[in-house]
Amino acid sequence: MIITIASFKGGVGKSTTAIHLAQYLGTRRGSGLVVLADGDPNHSALSWGNRSQSAQFKIVDSNDDLGEPDHLVIDTPARTEPEKLLPLIEGSDLLILPTNISPFSLEATIETLVNLPKLPRKSYRVLLTMIPSRGESREKQAREALQAVDIPVFKSRIQSRIVYADAELEGRSVDQMRGVSAKSAWDDYKKLGQEIIKEWH
Ligand SMILES: Nc1ncnc2c1ncn2[C@@H]1O[C@H](COP(=O)(O)OP(=O)(O)O)[C@@H](O)[C@H]1O
Ligand SMILES: [Mg+2]
């Protein structure tokens, strides 16, 4: 399956999500070849890949030969122009829009989506990321705001954890890190992966 990750704002966890989703898919039994195509000129995923010893997937520049992967995860540039969203959707089975729950971020996502022609419901889904500890009531408000305008959201959600920055530095994904926080972080992405496999695969 082809999964594209995009957002209308930078720094919302796209590359982190691309890496961890690719890692989840790559560690599944019989998963076949998983490729992460880095479409960001900043090449965050590629440079992480150069440091990584433990990635269970291949990382390539999206302009290079992608081979014939069983699963393709596409990471995109810092921010996507709204008019580019439809072509991205048409080129994938699923478009993930990571969004943090700060009002600015959420507004950017909602504003942009409600001003686009209505997208097929199964073609995309918002992923709430970097949810702070004790952020439950804000998360609930965020879900209600999205639901009110009929924007689909993953049940799974990604909590904010320092371990992502540590893992990034070491060229690891959080499943390769020690400690309780790393385990919880990996659980978040495992749940996301399971939700996707259950509904799209
Ligand atoms: N769930 C999270 N909790 C804490 N920090 C995170 C989380 N996800 C990503 N980060 C950190 O936030 C920064 C931006 O994330 P990144 O994935 O590069 O965003 P984007 O690709 O959308 O620009 C990175 O330094 C990353 O380590
Ligand atoms: Mg990025």
Image: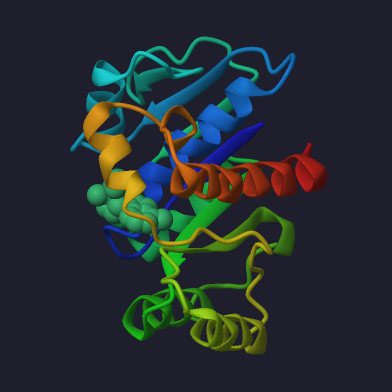
In the picture, measured across the screen, residue 65 lies left or right of residue 29, that is left
Q: Is residue 83 above or below residue 95?
A: below
Residue 120, position in %: x, y? 70, 62
In the picture, measured across the screen, residue 68 lies left or right of residue 195, that is left
State the residue in front, 38 or 117.
38
Q: Image quarter for residue 130? A: bottom left
State the residue in front, 24 or 5.
24
Q: Is residue 145 above or below residue 92?
A: below
Q: Residue furthest left?
A: 42
Q: Is residue 102 above or below residue 2?
A: below
In the picture, measured across the screen, residue 150 lies left or right of residue 189, that is right
Say which residue appears at 69% left-offset and 23% top-offset: 28
Residue 15, position in %: x, y? 36, 43
**Which corner quadrant holds the N terminus?**
top right
Residue 63, position in %: x, y? 32, 22
Can the viewer see residue 43 in this picture?
A: yes
Query: Colour scheme of this structure image?
Result: rainbow
**Which corner quadrant holds the C terminus?**
top right
Say which residue appears at 67% left-offset and 80% top-offset: 150
Can the viewer see residue 77 in this picture?
A: no
Residue 83, position in %: x, y? 40, 62
Say which residue appears at 47% left-offset and 47% top-offset: 5
Q: Image quarter for residue 2? A: top right
In the picture, measured across the screen, residue 123 lies left or right of residue 174, that is right
Count of marks placed on residues: 0
